[in-house]
């Protein structure tokens, strides 16, 4: 194998390497462009959806939080009232629980 054959092969391999790198850069640029278009479309769709809502999201979240707190307090109170049992001793020494 002569030096000219080796140089020709190296030149060919470097050309293919450069072409591959250029294609990858182009694909990256196209990918970023697609990502930005998708993001812009998603943001626009969310804005339209929020503008169509009869109640703003902040107020809706506040109402839901108040409902959840009220339901939790009611459940807690019902649990306390139900489990507030007293133990009553019977004549034979066994214990029976009865609600107050």
Image (tube, rainbow, N blue to C red):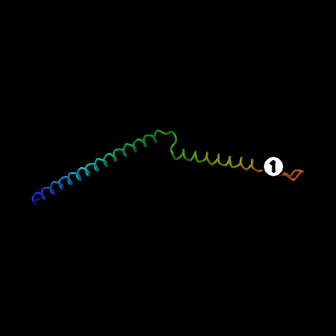
Q: Residue pushed farthest right?
A: 91
Residue bearing the label numbered 1: 97
Looking at the image, residue 78 sits to the left or right of residue 92; the answer is left
Picture residue at 20% right of the left edge, 51% below the top: 19
Residue 89 screen position, x and y as percent: 86, 52
Q: Residue pushed farthest bottom?
A: 3
Image quarter of residue 1: bottom left
In the depicted view, which residue is nearer to us: 12 or 43? Answer: 12
Picture residue at 26% right of the left edge, 51% below the top: 24
In the depicted view, which residue is nearer to us: 44 or 86? Answer: 86
Image quarter of residue 38: top left
Residue 94 screen position, x and y as percent: 85, 52
Looking at the image, residue 77 sits to the left or right of residue 21; the answer is right
In the depicted view, which residue is nearer to us: 54 or 44? Answer: 44
Looking at the image, residue 10 sits to the left or right of residue 68; the answer is left
Picture residue at 78% right of the left edge, 50% below the top: 85
Residue 20 screen position, x and y as percent: 23, 51
* Circle 1 Cα neighbour tier, 10 Å, few/some/many (<14 / 14–19 / ≥20): few
Picture residue at 89% right of the left edge, 51% below the top: 92
In the depicted view, which residue is nearer to us: 16 or 28? Answer: 16
Instruction: Count every numbered label the image shows and give the total.
Output: 1
As helix, strand or loop, the secondary structure at mark 1 comes to strand
């Amino acid at each position: 194998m002569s030096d000219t054959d080796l140089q020709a092969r190296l030149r060919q391999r470097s050309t293919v390497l450069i072409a591959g790198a250029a294609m990858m850069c182009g694909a990256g640029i196209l990918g970023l462009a697609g990502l930005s278009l998708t993001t812009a479309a998603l943001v626009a769709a969310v804005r339209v959806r929020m503008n169509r809502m009869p109640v703003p999201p902040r107020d809706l979240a506040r109402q839901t939080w108040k409902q959840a707190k009220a339901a939790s307090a009611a459940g807690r109170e019902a649990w306390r009232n139900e489990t507030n049992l007293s133990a009553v001793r019977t004549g034979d020494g066994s214990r029976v629980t009865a609600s107050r």
